[in-house]
Image (cartoon, grey):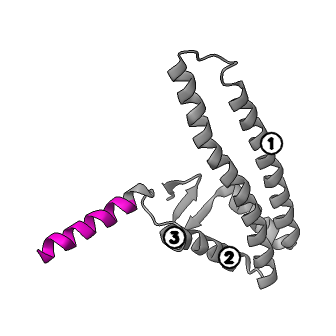
């Protein structure tokens, strides 16, 4: 009986992990990954605590705009489903959806530019050069280069 209960609990935990894309939200795996990446970047750049605070605040503002885009996806799915169910799928049917996308992307672009200005203004010349090199070449850890979410081994 105890084995059955333990197995059920493990199954429920596995389903939760898989439903959330392989990691827990908040303080779980994804949260630690972002914190680890930022800590690693700050150490590499030799930033001051004041710089770190300003950079994290700017990135949090950008994250808010990113959330708005993510929330729009559910509305977009509903709009497309409604058009398909109605049997009338044409440009006019989805025009408001596309207009919302345009407005959100414009806001996201502005937020990205503002975040980039704030981060760039926080860094000194040496740090800006390092960040520019990291953006252009990707981030390398022990011979493995990470760029655009793909892993490439470099010889």
Q: Is residue 4 left or right of residue 58?
A: left
Q: Earlier in the sequence, mark 1 or mark 2?
A: 2
- List the single residue furthest toward the left: 1
25 or 44, nearer to the observer: 25
Q: Is residue 2 above or below residue 69?
A: below
In the figure, residue 54 lies in which quadrant?
Answer: bottom right
* Part of the protein shown in magenta: 1-17
53 or 3, nearer to the observer: 3
Q: Residue at x 68, y 31 (%)?
A: 97
Looking at the figure, which quarter contains the N terminus? bottom left
Secondary structure mostly seen in magenta is: helix
- List the single residue furthest toward the bottom: 49
- Neighbourhood count class around disc 1 (C-alpha, 10 Å): few under 14, some 14–19, many 20 upward: few
Which tag is nearer the camera, tag 1 or tag 2?
Answer: 1
Q: Earlier in the sequence, mark 2 or mark 3?
A: 2
- Is label 2 in contact with label 3 (beta carbons under 8 Å)? no
Q: CA distance from mark 1 to mark 2?
A: 32 Å
- Residue 10 magenta: yes
Q: Is residue 67 above or below residue 43?
A: above
Which tag is nearer the camera, tag 3 or tag 1?
Answer: 1
- Residue 42 magenta: no
Q: Is residue 90 left or right of residue 103?
A: left
Number of labelled discs?
3
Question: Label 3, on which residue?
Answer: 142
Horizontal and vertical percent position of residue 46: 74, 81
Question: Label 1, on which residue?
Answer: 106
| Secondary-structure class at tag 2 | helix
């Amino acid at each position: 009986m105890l084995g059955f209960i333990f197995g059920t609990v493990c199954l429920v935990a596995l389903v939760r992990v898989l439903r959330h894309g392989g990691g827990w939200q908040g303080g779980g795996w994804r949260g630690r990954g972002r914190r680890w990446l930022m800590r690693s970047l700050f150490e590499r750049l030799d930033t001051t605590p004041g710089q770190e605070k300003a950079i994290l605040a700017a990135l949090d503002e950008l994250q808010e705009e990113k959330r708005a885009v993510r929330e729009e996806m559910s509305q977009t799915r509903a709009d497309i489903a409604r058009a398909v169910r109605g049997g009338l799928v044409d440009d006019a049917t989805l025009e408001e959806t596309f207009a919302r996308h345009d407005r959100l992307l414009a806001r996201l672009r502005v937020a990205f530019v503002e975040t980039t200005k704030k981060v760039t203004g926080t860094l000194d010349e040496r740090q800006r050069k390092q960040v520019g090199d990291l953006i252009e070449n990707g981030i390398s850890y022990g011979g493995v280069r990470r760029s655009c979410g793909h892993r490439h081994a470099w010889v």
